[in-house]
Image (spheres, helix red, strand yellow):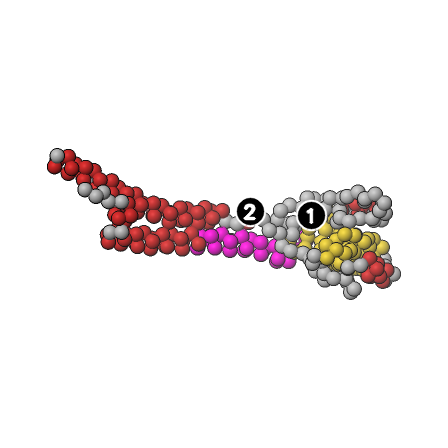
Amino acid sequence: MTQPTFWQVARRPQWIAALLLVMAVAAVFAFLGKWQLERAVISGQNTDHQTETVVPLSTLAKPGGIVDERAAGHMASVGGGLDTNTLVILGDRMNGGQKGYWLVGRFTTPEGELAEALGWAPTLESVTAVRDRMQPTASTLIGHEITGRFMPSEAPTVPPDGADPLSMTTMSVAALLNVWPESNRLMYTGYLVASVPPEGLVKIDSTPPVSDSTYNWLNIFYAIEWTVFAGFAFYVWYRLVRDRRERELEENALAGLSED
């Protein structure tokens, strides 16, 4: 007696109909998984979007305090004045994939002192020209509000051999304190990247922070769960077909013994 193969059993009308039903169920599970994944991404985007809402700097950090995850990368505004005698040029600063220079200075707020990254220039000559133009205007430009992205301080670096020992390439608040005039006021441990640069400079690239922790992991877990369910539906169909074949093999074997 010819023994049926798995695929011979699977091609029978009832098992083809069962497979179509399984495919429909798996499609529903896959859709639910996709929906859960989209919800997780949207949740993460909504959390990141909150950093783009401009809030007073005083609500994010205090002078001398740490820059926590909530404050880092957040858009903020603060009033005060820029001390044009503190303008410093930083080298090797990338902007839009191009290396250039930052112009930074000390901004005096009612709460304390704040390092401000004013803008970017592609050449040393152009950023120096802006600095030299701004310095004679006034000792301190007061009474205006600035807006920008509040960032944690970068680590200081040692200038390479042969370079100017006073040259700087990182936005280190600690290093700036060593070159700025002494002040008896507390300093913010972060700095602000200005949204509007002075004339002659380019706005510094400033992107929102991206963190995996902003995503809704519960939604991601559900998405994985629905995907597993979809695969399990096919596995159930496979097991049913295989069990049916094995049952037929046993029945055929018993029938053969009875004939003998």
> Mark 1 to mark 2: distance in Å?
19 Å
Residue at the bottom extreme of this rendering: 199
Q: Give residue 68's quadrant in the image.
A: top right
Q: Which residue position holds label 1? A: 152
Given the image, on which type of amino acid does mark 2 rest?
Answer: Ser
Majority SS type along the magenta span: helix
Q: Name which residue lies at 16% across and 37% down.
A: 256
* 158 in magenta: no
Horizontal side, residue 186 vs residue 225: left or right: right
Disc number at residue 213? 2
Q: Earlier in the sequence, mark 1 or mark 2?
A: 1
Horizontal side, residue 156 vs residue 27: left or right: right
Q: Name which residue lies at 64% across and 49% down.
A: 71
Q: Which residues are magenta?
A: 35-59
Q: Is residue 96 above or below residue 178?
A: below
Q: Give residue 159's quadrant in the image.
A: top right
> Which of 120/63 is in front?
120
Q: Are marks 1 and 2 in contact (CB under 8 Å)?
A: no
Q: Name which residue lies at 75% across and 55% down.
A: 99
Residue at the left extreme of this rendering: 259
Given the image, on which type of amino acid does mark 1 rest?
Answer: Pro
